[in-house]
Amino acid sequence: MGAIDITAPAAANQRQAPLSMSRPLLVLEGIEKGFGGAQVLHGIDLTINDGEFLTVLGASGSGKTTVLRLIGGFTEPSAGRILFEGADIVSVPAYRRPVNTVFQDYALFPHLTVAGNVAYGLEARGTARDVLRPKVAEALERVALKGFDARYPSQLSGGQRQRVALARALVLEPRLILLDEPLGALDAALRRQMQVFLKQLQREIRTTFLLVTHDQEEAIVMSDRICVLDAGRIAQIGTPHELYYRPASEYIARFFGDNNLIEGRLGPSAAAVRFVETAAGRLMVSTKDQSDVAEAPTGTPVKIALRPEAIQVAPGSEFENHLSGTIRDVTFAGAISQIVIQPSGETARPLTIKLASRAAGLGLSRGQPISAGWRSADCRILLR
Amino acid sequence: MQTVKHRWKDRLQRVLITTLVWTPPIGLIVLPLAGFLAYSFFALDNGEIVHRFTFGNYIRFFSDAVFVPQFLRTCLLAAGVGVITLLAAYPVALLLWSLEGRAKHLMLVLFVIPLLMSYILKIFSIRAILGGRGYLNTLLMAAGVITEPTPFLLFNLTAVFLTLSIILFPFTLLPLFVTLERIPKALIQASSDLGGAGWLTFRRVVLPLSWPGGVIGASFTFVLALGDFVTPQMVGGPTGLTFGRIVYSQFGLAYNWPFGSALAVILMAAVLAVLALAARIGRSQGGPP
Ligand SMILES: Nc1ncnc2c1ncn2[C@@H]1O[C@H](COP(=O)(O)OP(=O)(O)O)[C@@H](O)[C@H]1O
Ligand SMILES: [Mg+2]
């Protein structure tokens, strides 16, 4: 068996118009969930729109699987409602819910062949054999497993099992597919390949995907929207772009990569900007669409989130923020190079800068003095 | 020089370990069995064992009008015990499986506790249930089903069947329960996620994944029932004759060790055949051969 081209379905759907994502398909309303004494989910309000790819992102133990189990019907909320197209489905048993799950460890039936696994749901519905067979074949072809019908799960690789689990859910044409860390067990290269494949598949079949992961990069690559879960509470919901560039809290800023967090106190405000007094001097930060920051009292302790790639070395005058310091470290990491600088203020914390690497080198070395700067629009004040 | 000496030491050590590992099973199991096998080819002359090779004992077994039918009847009885215990073990194992935490372990211990009791104690308990003034007769009389104690409950083949089924039940139950416990809960959820309600999940997932365990348990029970002679002796009466009792009587009463050995060898062959079959079924569980 040669390498399987799981990127094949890509071309077919490039032309399709973007899906409208306005209609709510599933709504979680004030969901609380506890196990015995431990409260696992706190007041979860989440709307999943028809046709979107929504990712629930959170650290291990934050309650992601519990959210999926509630929607799949394997456990009941302590309080709150789960509305599917407006109707409460809390009391509907799992086998009658219009959703299907791709389980964390795939949960393939070991005693059934690949075809038997994929046919299982159709057989449970009493689908006639002559309808069933082409459907199973189509689902297997969609996940690039044509010709694997007669194999048993124990004869497949991890990636292949993962795709059988996917086909087993797809074949039932559910309105919503729940995926619990579907790529967690795959190696890095295969995982990246599968991220693209899943995203394209979702567009192609125009089905709503609710995926759970602890990998922020995965969430950014695949999702239309991301819901970040922090210890059973929703920390922020938004597009990957919003979460990346407009984190609502320090937690989100930390989760989404390697923001520099500069401590300071709020200073005076001007038109659409606010000054912050820091150990590295007075910095200017845009307060565009952050009315709470614009109105917060002077002296409030805050943190500034500053993305490493927004910082320029030897900046021109169009950069409102400048500081000088010495280079502490230079690390070549392929496409980018990471530079750590120590600003000259006595108590200032080091800053990390990411620059595109060049073949001739960046001409920067440890101990060298350096000046850096960034635009007020490229950083953001965090009140919490 | 040194390496040669070293290698020699290594080899000696390996021989020693091999000897130690194989001595107990060979000395305690294989040799006595081989002894029986050898005896089964000897003859008895005026109460004296004649050490001369003969198929006589086997010819007697197959030609006599009593032994083969008796052997088959006992096989049937033991198979019946295996099947009945399997049918009874399924609902019990499923119940245990569905319980959680303490309740599960408590119930399991309750069902398995007879294994810890003395064999004789168990049999006398059952005689107290089935006997002329036992609970069952008292109950049937109180219910007005019978007017006087029925003798059909004790000292016949039915009594042997009932007693063996009750006593050997844990041997069927345990392997079945263990197999059920090994089924990942995610598979049950997956079935239900794909639209399988309770019965379908049982038929398509639980049953196929657990019956090899049930079959292994039932074959243990079959093997134990086939060779047993204590229970038939205690509750079987004159009509509750089984092959195990016949083998026993050849050694104990008739002092015909060669013929008894031949019968024991035949019994052993049947047991091995059943165990081999059960092992095959056990291996076939979950996926390709
Ligand atoms: N059945 C359960 N009984 C008790 N505690 C549970 C159960 N399921 C989950 N939990 C607890 O709920 C928390 C969230 O679990 P989970 O939803 O699996 O997290 P995640 O999928 O984000 O890693 C964990 O602290 C876990 O211990
Ligand atoms: Mg999980």
Image (cartoon, coloured by chain):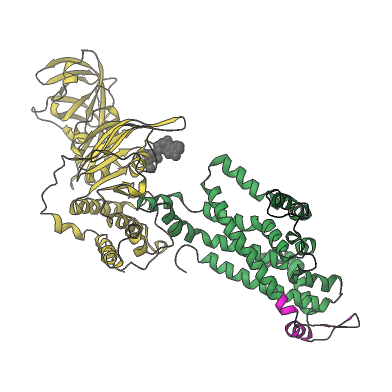
Chain colours: A yellow, B green
**Range of residues picked out in magenta:** B41-70
Q: Percent from the top left, x then y, of residue B150?
A: 74, 58
Name the residue nearer the viewer: B151 or A184: B151
Ligand 1, image quadrant it occupies: top left
Image quadrant where residue A160 sits:
bottom left
Residue A137 is one of the magenta-drawn residues: no
Kindly identify the residue that appears in the image at 11 percent across and 52 percent down.
A16
Name the residue nearer the viewer: B185 or A382: B185
Q: Is residue A51 above or below residue A34?
A: below
Can residue A257 be seen here?
Answer: no
Q: Percent from the top left, x then y, of residue A373?
A: 16, 28
Q: Quadrant of the C terminus of chain A?
A: top left
Name the residue nearer the viewer: A207 or A97: A97
Kindly identify the residue that appears in the image at 11 percent across and 28 percent down.
A319
Image quadrant where residue A311 sits:
top left
Q: Is residue A101 above or below residue A245?
A: below
Q: How many numbered badges does the structure rendering display?
A: 0
Q: Percent from the top left, x then y, of residue A323?
A: 18, 25
Can residue B133 be seen here?
Answer: yes
Kindly identify the residue that appears in the image at 70 percent across and 68 percent down.
B226
Image quadrant where residue A21 sits:
top left
